[in-house]
Each structure stands twice: as C-alpha cells, then as structure tokens.
Image (tube, rainbow, N blue to C red):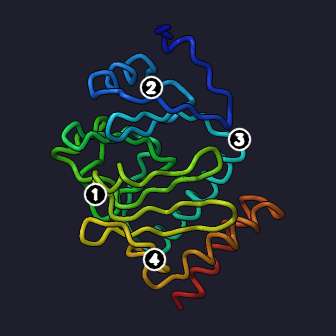
Amino acid sequence: MIAVQLQQISIPPGQHIVLKNINWQKFENILLELGESRSSRIYYYQETLELMTPLPEHERIKVILSDLIKVLLDELNMNWESLGSTTFKREDMQAGVEPDDCFYIQNYEQVIGKNRIDLTIDSPPDLVLEIDLTSKTQINAYQSLKVPEIWIYDESKLEIYCLQNEQYILSQNSIIFPDFPIQEAMIRFLKMSQSIGTTQTLKQFRNWIRSAIN
C-alpha cells in the first residue's frame, strides 16, 4: 500500500475527496495538519472524511444569503452571533462539520467573545447555511450534533430541514422565521442580486421586510 502525505493532496476549487476508515485520532491529526488558514472545508461522520474546496460562485451565493439572513434578523430585532465556518465536532458522536455559515440566535449569549466551541458544554448553532455547488450536504453529522435548523441551497432552490424528535423533517417553513416565506424570498432576492447588485438587493429586501411587518 502506498502512503500519501496530506501535504501531497491538492483539491482544486469545485472538487472534493472522500477518505475512508479515518478514526477520531486521525481526524484530529488531519485538522491539526490542515490548520485554520485554509480554503478547504471538512465533513466527518463515522470514520468517513470529506474535504472540499468551494468555487467562487459558491462563496458569492453564501455571502449574499448570509447577508439576507442578517438583515432579516436585524429588522426583526433578533439578537444573533455568526460563527461562519467554525469547526463543530464531538468525539462521542463521531461527527465533525464546518458549515458555510451558521448563526446563534436563541443561544447567542453563549458564544459572545468565545474563540473555541465545545459542543459537550456549548449549544450547537441554531441555524446552519449550506451551499451545495461542489458536493451534496450530508445531514447525518448535523443530526448527531443536534443543530435545530439547516438551510441548503441547491440548483436555484432552498430546502429547509427542521430537527423534530431527533430527525430532520423537510419543511416549507422555518422554525426561526415562521411568519416569512423564506424559501420564496431568499431565492427571489438572490436572483435579484445577480442583476442589480448586492447593495440595492439588500436595500429592497429590507424594505420588503418592513412592509411585511407593517
């Protein structure tokens, strides 16, 4: 068998690799070797590790959707903290993920000023955002980590998964924003940003929220 060092593996943007039979200690060693200053993201569940490098399109969509979420939270006067692509992991669950973005909302006070998250004592993020352009999001790890809500953008549609009785249910409505047509609104304003730009889109989105509230 030929041993390949991690430094020898190059993952071009838009590509991903899957490594099997990676026990927890190997996973921790790989995270340490990869370091925090990297473009790749990880997904680990039950000894299977996926490494992916996002495309520029992936990052653009992520930023716009994240900005829309922040505007919605602000207009609804909801406190929040975003931890971006923080590594969330639990050895007892054999799970580790790095979302495209994530938000602490109900539990925002827990993470103010924290540089390290320990899910054995800290809550998971209340909302996770994933953009499926490079690879398909596997939700098993998120289920193990008990993330309440996941939004997955894929091929011009947004799917909402809500955790109920420790299982994810595909839902038409968000638990966090039950009074807003999240799927329709996010896709509509995302498309709008491609023609009028981010700044004008966020302004129009803010006005739309205010009209809906009133």
Element assignment for label 2 = loop
1 or 3: tag closer to the N-terminus: 3
- Of residues 162 and 68, which is closer to you in this image? 162
Residue beneath disc 3: 56
Q: Residue furthest right?
A: 195
1 or 4: tag closer to the N-terminus: 1
- Of residues 183 and 109, which is closer to you in this image? 183
Cα–Cα gap, marks 2 and 4: 34 Å
Cα–Cα gap, marks 1 and 2: 24 Å
Q: Residue at x 43, y 21 (%)?
A: 35
State whether residue 132 is above or below residue 177. above
Cα–Cα gap, marks 1 and 4: 17 Å
Neighbourhood count class around disc 2 (C-alpha, 10 Å): few under 14, some 14–19, many 20 upward:
few
Quadrant position of residue 118: top left
4 or 3: tag closer to the N-terminus: 3
Neighbourhood count class around disc 4 (C-alpha, 10 Å): few under 14, some 14–19, many 20 upward:
some
Residue beneath disc 4: 171
3 or 2: tag closer to the N-terminus: 2
Cα–Cα gap, marks 4 and 3: 29 Å
Q: Residue at x 51, y 47 (%)?
A: 100
- Of residues 169 and 87, which is closer to you in this image? 169
Residue beneath disc 2: 36
- Is 157 placed left or right of 27 in the picture? right
Amino acid at circle 2: Glu
Amino acid at circle 4: Ser
Residue beneath disc 1: 146
Residue 12: image location, x then y, percent:
68, 28
- Of residues 77 and 186, which is closer to you in this image? 186
